[in-house]
Image (cartoon, grey):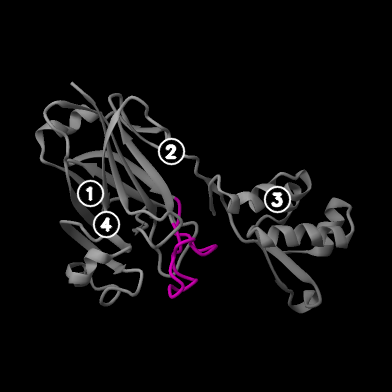
Amino acid sequence: MELDLEKYSLPVYECLASETRLKMLKFIGNRKKSIGEIADYLNMSNAIVTRHVQQMEDAGLLNSERGVGENRNKKMVFLKVDDIHITFPEKVYQGYKLHQTNLRLGHFTDFNVKPTCGLATTKNVVGKSDDPKYFMAPERVDASLMWFSEGFVEYKIPNMLTEDEDPNMLEISFEIASEFPLSNNVWPSDISIYVNDILVAVYTVPGNFSDIRGRYTPLWWNDEFSQYGLLKHLRINKLDTGIDGEAYSPVTVADLNLNKNPFIKLRLAVEPDAVNKGGLTLFGKGFGNHNQDIVINTYYLDK
């Protein structure tokens, strides 16, 4: 589950702001528990436990079903999510000037992908799934969702810097998940990120998420398919390269030679020799939890 600081995340925060409900979540763990079992464990009445369970079901943390066999007359409760990511507002880099580019997912300039793979616009799948030739279909420029199990996509982004502008940081943000037939919330994948042909980071995305529907995912998209990803901010500054504040490599913005190139080359790859070869899914505007495509920010100072 992915949360931020907006109002619709409050029900989850309210559920977690209770020692009793935290104990319940720990007790349930990875096994289905009946209301009676939870009540006995917490030394509480079934009625009070039921109210707590209902609140956590409404927030999307728990699910329930009627039991089978000896438990057929009992309500069995189980976890609906296994991890939660919280996105805080982006930092404001005061004093710097900015060139910004919004890049559609389908505007790649090179690719080599293997099934499972495909593209989708907000209205339909482009061509046919699992056939790489449709990555060259004219409709691919409107893609808002992309997935593949192995390979790469590469973009060339206009470099708006002039000779009189000194780049201090390159920031690239995108919503990403791994790729799994249907979906698997625990399916790690190592994503190799190249900028101007330099490997700047290998990020392990933890899964392919469908525990809840993406906030912007179209209604026609099947509930069991990948619904959203995690919004990642890759930042290459004068000291190193990091993702969401965590250092990933010693590559600096000076290593990219931005002032000498008319464009910025970005490649996202799942390498054949990756330790976790779990594929890649990119979410653009109209899919997922963040209504954006790939955003490239170049922060600079006048020389």
Q: Secondary structure at mark 1?
A: strand
Specify the amino acid type for callout 1: Arg
Res 31 visible: no
| Mark closer to the chain start, 1 or 4 | 4
Q: Residue at x 49, y 56 (%)?
A: 186
Mark nearest the camera among 1 and 3 is 3
Q: Residue at x 81, y 62 (%)?
A: 50
Seen as rendered, the residue at the extreme top is 303
What residue is pinned by disc 4?
A: 104
* Number of disc labels: 4
Specify the amino acid type for callout 3: Cys
Q: Measure the alpha-carbon separation of dots 4 and 3.
A: 37 Å
Q: Secondary structure at mark 3?
A: helix
Which residue range is magenta in the image? 206-228
| Mark closer to the chain start, 2 or 1 | 2
What residue is pinned by disc 3?
A: 15
